[in-house]
Amino acid sequence: MNFKYDVIVVGAGHAGCEAAAAAANMGSKTLLITMDMNKIAQMSCNPAVGGIAKGQIVREIDALGGQMGIVTDTTAIQFRMLNRSKGPAMWSPRAQSDRAHFILKWKEVLDNTDNLYIWQDAVTSLLIGEEKEVTGVKTAMGVEFSAKSVVLTNGTFLNGLMHIGKVQLAGGRVSEPASYGLTEQLKSLGFTADRMKTGTPVRIDGRSVDFSLMEEQAGENDFHKFSYLDFKPRTLKQLSCWITYTNEEVHSILNDGLADSPMYNGQIKSIGPRYCPSIETKIVTFADKNAHQLFLEPEGENTQEYYLNGFSSSLPLHTQVEALMKVPAFRNIHIYRPGYAIEYDFFDPTQLTHTLETKLIKNLFFAGQINGTTGYEEAGGQGLIAGINAHLKTVGDKEFVLKRDEAYIGVLIDDLVTKGVDEPYRMFTSRAEYRILLRQDDADMRLTEKGCEIGLVKEDRKKLLEEKKEQINRLIEFTGNYSLKPEYINEGLTALGTSPLKQGLKLKDIITRPQITIENISEFVPAFKEELDKLPNRREEIIEATEIRIKYDGYIKREQLIADKISRLENIRIKGKFDYSTIKALSIEARQKLTNIDPETIAQASRIPGVSPNDISILLVLMGR
């Protein structure tokens, strides 16, 4: 066995799987090291992918040639497009996955990826060269593997400690050992580390639930998927989720148990997630609320196991069960295991560049929860970028970076390396200032050509994009040139609930009306219907993308104009050009922050908390602007 590799990826969670697949598919001889080959891409928390802003990230991963979208589509037991009542910039795909199938599908993908090898073991230390570059890893078995680049995706395993009431268990996940050694080594090399906390809810036996007392939420079965390559019907049994609520009796029992809560008795001191709080945090923070929503999610098509979203907890087992039994649907509850909290080490992400390479050690990359993020999708997006850049470092000095107006992944990474984190970072549409440009429907239009340029996107995906572009442009051109006269279309417009024409109008202008869609207007315009009938098997996808382009054309152009103006600041590179500590005109905070982060550009400097517009003006003057 040859122990020499181009890229080594440590950890086979969502970040590690994407990183390893990307590096291998680009041509690097890649080794993926995991402590348990049966837990590859384990869904540690809820069995779902996507959601608000997260779904956009998965579409972007897919558009760039990543795997998460393909795996999710294959293993989906429910699919929904969230936020349909809002504009398309807010539409967010979400799927429930069969947890067991998800692992098996990812394992199948990795096992059959050329250049990719798997080793079951725990990494205990990095091998560091004389010029402060990583040269490989050493494992618990005493094996040394060499590599040109290493990607750390350790998840919650670095010195992981689980809490259930006063019970403490060492581990990175229930029944799985923690990882030791790496944090201590990295701190000795000068890295700053801290602790974070996350949690997971109770798992419930569906046979003990009274579903008649819950509100059913079924999935949708239209053309939407995560992967732009997937046109096939879903193969697994489609299942519903269920909604119920806590009540005052539940809250009373939870309140009585707070004295034994690790979060309130001083046992846990680390940073927890604000946007996905535990049930005990909810009843304390929102003490005036009489009820909180609980969302029961199926774990798979052939299991009775359900995940209770909204009831994350580290309270003692008996408190969790006693409280749940006061929910009418759970009065006869039987659980597989209680919820628990977990503390783990993470590293300040301002110690990274936008490629996710560390500033202190060359050719070493961090991705996922090690950077202070939370969520499968955030991890997958980081893993993809880290894997791409780890490969690029093995073949030259080229870098792959996504800007804030190009992808949610770009927003995510820029936020991390520029602002750092003071709580587990979770993506929201509100974090993106250009969300009209970053819609889920056009991730392939934004990113697939970039994936082609770096060699990750294959020919079949490239061909599909070219066909899609051609069809959309053809429809837009047709609607922009085709005129409608009142005598021919007014009857149809009235039938569709919109005002009749007083004079001729282009079809494109009629489609901008809120009551009009491409499909419904085509019933009254035979020539347009003929054009639609020429569309290939991606008819619905192409029509939706075309309609969004037409209806929101003004908004898209305006936002693109703003993005182009800001991008001029992105082109003013300042890294390494200033000794900020000597520029007395800058505020003391700005000097400290700029020295610490050493931003690449003026635009990045402007996004650093504590750097004011006045500080930016000073830097522009010093740059001769």
Image (cartoon, grey):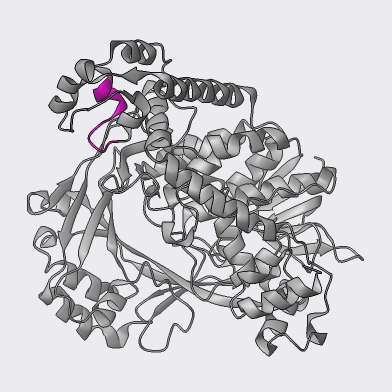
- The quarter of the rendered structure image containing the N terminus is top right
Quarter of the image where one finds residue 388? top right
Q: Is residue 48 left or right of residue 581?
A: left
Q: Is residue 205 above or below residue 254?
A: above
Q: Is residue 570 above or below residue 160?
A: above
Give the residue drawn at x 68%, y 61%.
569
- The quarter of the rendered structure image containing the C terminus is bottom right
The one nearer the camera, 164 or 141, is 164
Q: Is residue 473 above or below residue 315?
A: above
Magenta segment includes 372: no
Which region shows up in magenta?
A: 513-521
* Residue 500 percent coordinates (x, y): 18, 28
Label tally? 0
Residue 489 in sight here = yes
Give the residue drawn at x 37%, y 28%.
508
* Residue 423 percent coordinates (x, y): 49, 73
Quarter of the image where one finds residue 25? top right
* Residue 169 percent coordinates (x, y): 46, 73
Quarter of the image where one finds residue 246? bottom left
Q: Is residue 432 left or right of residue 461?
A: left
Q: Is residue 147 above or below residue 433?
A: above
Magenta segment includes 518: yes
Q: Is residue 549 left or right of residue 204?
A: right
* Residue 207 percent coordinates (x, y): 17, 49
